[in-house]
Each structure stands twice: as structure tokens, then as C-alpha cells.
Image (cartoon, grey):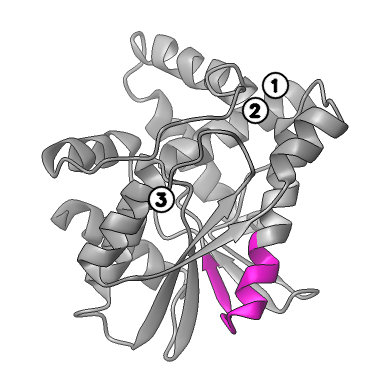
């Protein structure tokens, strides 16, 4: 946890992500990334230089088999406030719209739902658990599939919602998160989306693993290029 906290704190300070009195919605999917970030932010509260509050928010997409028990147990143990927003996003995307490429629409609808929840809970910021590997994968996905150079930003202000998105794990590597989850035996939620393992992101992830066998610096080199692009400004996707 110390290494994760150190990298997270550096990102927060580098990009002024958290200020005095912030009320932060922590988007919790139930996976390893968001659960680790939730615990890290809760730990950070105890010694950080400014005071802030966090609320864990889970967007229920309406899939069969949705079981929030692991998240509820973790939040109760760590004394973290939890809000569950029930939606019909899964039914709309898969059953009504029958999207052939559902991930984009589903992602947009989830973001809209969590933005609305943040306003309803009187929160001014939303924290997402995107890490360094996510940044590299998103960059390559945009390049390969859209023919453009694009990446998500560490901090993005949404003027229409008057809410700021932050990504405190932007310096954290996925392998560090996996190690933390294993060491502390954190139980993620069971994956129930039918697209899990069959997305373009999964393909890019596997491609990076393959290429990294020949070039162990591949991820760090790509992330370095992304950071150097800051002189032109990060762009949110």
C-alpha cells in the first residue's frame, strides 16, 4: 500500500486533484482497480494536508447476478459511505438497442449516471480508478481504431455538470494493484458483463503483453510520450 499511496499522492499533488473541503464520489465497479483506489483514498484521508470526504458509488447496470456483497462488506469494515444507483443500462444497451459494439454506449451511459449521482449527493468531484496501464491502452486504442492521438486527462472539469473528474491512479501500475489485492486478499465483485474478455481494450492489453516480451520498456516509453504531450495539453476521451 505504501508504494501505491506514494504514487497516488504524487499524482494528486502534481495535478492539484484534491483541495480543502472536496466531497468526492469514488466510482466503484467492484473490480480490483476501483476497490484499491477506494481503500487508498480512505487511507490518504488520515494524513493528507487537506480535509476531504469520499462516498463510494456503485452503478448497478441491471445485469442478472449483480451481487454487491463484497463491496458492502468492505465499506462496512472501513467505515466508508456507500451509495448504489440502480439503472436499466444493461437492458437498454443489450436488449433494447442490441448494440453490436456496446462498450461505448454503455460507458457513456454509466458516466452520465455517476455524474447525476455526484450532483444529487452534493459532491464536486468524481474519482475514477484508471491507472497507468489504462492510459497506455487508451492511447493505443485511439491510435489504432480511430486514427488519432487521444488520451484521458488526469483532471477534467465538466462545466455542464459543474463537476471535476480526477484519476488519482494515473501513476500507479496495474501490477502493483494486482499485488495489493492478492496480498490483502481483497475480494472483487464477480464479473457479469457478457462482453468481458472480448473487448478491443482486452485485445490491446494482450498485444502490449506480447510486445513487452521483446521490449520491457514499451509501457513506460509510451506513458512517457503521453506525459510529454502535456505541453500540448491532455485531452479527455
* Figure check: 99 above or below 91: above
**Residue at horizontal 43%, vertical 12%?**
211
Number of marks drawn: 3
Residue 165 drawn at (x, y percent): 59, 65
Residue 172 drawn at (x, y percent): 33, 47
Residue 215, picture quadrant: top left
Horizontal side, residue 34 vs residue 3: left or right:
right
For label 1, count other residues whose C-alpha is less than 10 Å away and answer few (under 14), some (14-19) or many (20+).
few
Residue 32, picture quadrant: top left
Name of the residue lying farthest toward the right: 97
Q: Of the two numbered discs 3 and 2 on the same chain, state the one appearing first in sequence.
A: 3
For label 3, count other residues whose C-alpha is less than 10 Å away and answer few (under 14), some (14-19) or many (20+).
many
Horizontal side, residue 161 vs residue 118: left or right:
right
Q: Which residue is mark 2?
A: 141
**Residue at horizontal 58%, vertical 54%?**
59
Query: Distance from label 1 to label 3 (Cα)?
Result: 27 Å
Q: Secondary structure at mark 2?
A: helix
Residue 34 has which mark? 3
Residue 233 drawn at (x, y percent): 65, 58
Horizontal side, residue 21 vs residue 84: left or right:
left
Query: Distance from label 3 to label 2 (Cα)?
Result: 21 Å
Answer yes or no: is residue 74 visible: yes
Q: Are marks 2 and 1 in contact (CB under 8 Å)?
A: yes
Q: Which residue is mark 1?
A: 144
Residue 180 drawn at (x, y percent): 19, 43
* Figure check: 183 above or below 127: above
Q: Are marks 1 and 3 in contact (CB under 8 Å)?
A: no
Answer yes or no: is residue 236 visible: no
**Residue at horizontal 59%, vertical 16%?**
198
Q: Which residues are magenta?
A: 114-126
* Figure check: 106 above or below 166: above
Amino acid at each position: 500500500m505504501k508504494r501505491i499511496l506514494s504514487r497516488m499522492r504524487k499524482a494528486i499533488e502534481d495535478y492539484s486533484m484534491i483541495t480543502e473541503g472536496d466531497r468526492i464520489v469514488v466510482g466503484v465497479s467492484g473490480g480490483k482497480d476501483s476497490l484499491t483506489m477506494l481503500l487508498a483514498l480512505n487511507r490518504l484521508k488520515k494524513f493528507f494536508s487537506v480535509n476531504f470526504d469520499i462516498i463510494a458509488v456503485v452503478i448497478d447496470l441491471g445485469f442478472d447476478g449483480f451481487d454487491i456483497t463484497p463491496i458492502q462488506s468492505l465499506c462496512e469494515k472501513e467505515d466508508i459511505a456507500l451509495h448504489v444507483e440502480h439503472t436499466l443500462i444493461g437492458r437498454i444497451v443489450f436488449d433494447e438497442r442490441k448494440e453490436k459494439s456496446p462498450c461505448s454506449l454503455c460507458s457513456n451511459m454509466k458516466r452520465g449516471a455517476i455524474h447525476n449521482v455526484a450532483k444529487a449527493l452534493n459532491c464536486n468531484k468524481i474519482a475514477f480508478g484508471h491507472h497507468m496501464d489504462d492510459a497506455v491502452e487508451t492511447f493505443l486504442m485511439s491510435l489504432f481504431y480511430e486514427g488519432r492521438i487521444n488520451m484521458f486527462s488526469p483532471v477534467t472539469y465538466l462545466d455542464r455538470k459543474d463537476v471535476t473528474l480526477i484519476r488519482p491512479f494515473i501513476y500507479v501500475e496495474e501490477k502493483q494493484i494486482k499485488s495489493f489485492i492478492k496480498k490483502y486478499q481483497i475480494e472483487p465483485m464477480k464479473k457479469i458483463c457478457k462482453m468481458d474478455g472480448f473487448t478491443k481494450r482486452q485485445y490491446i492489453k494482450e498485444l502490449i503483453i506480447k510486445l513487452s516480451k521483446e521490449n520491457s520498456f514499451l509501457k513506460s516509453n509510451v506513458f512517457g510520450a503521453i506525459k510529454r504531450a502535456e505541453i500540448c495539453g491532455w485531452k479527455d476521451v
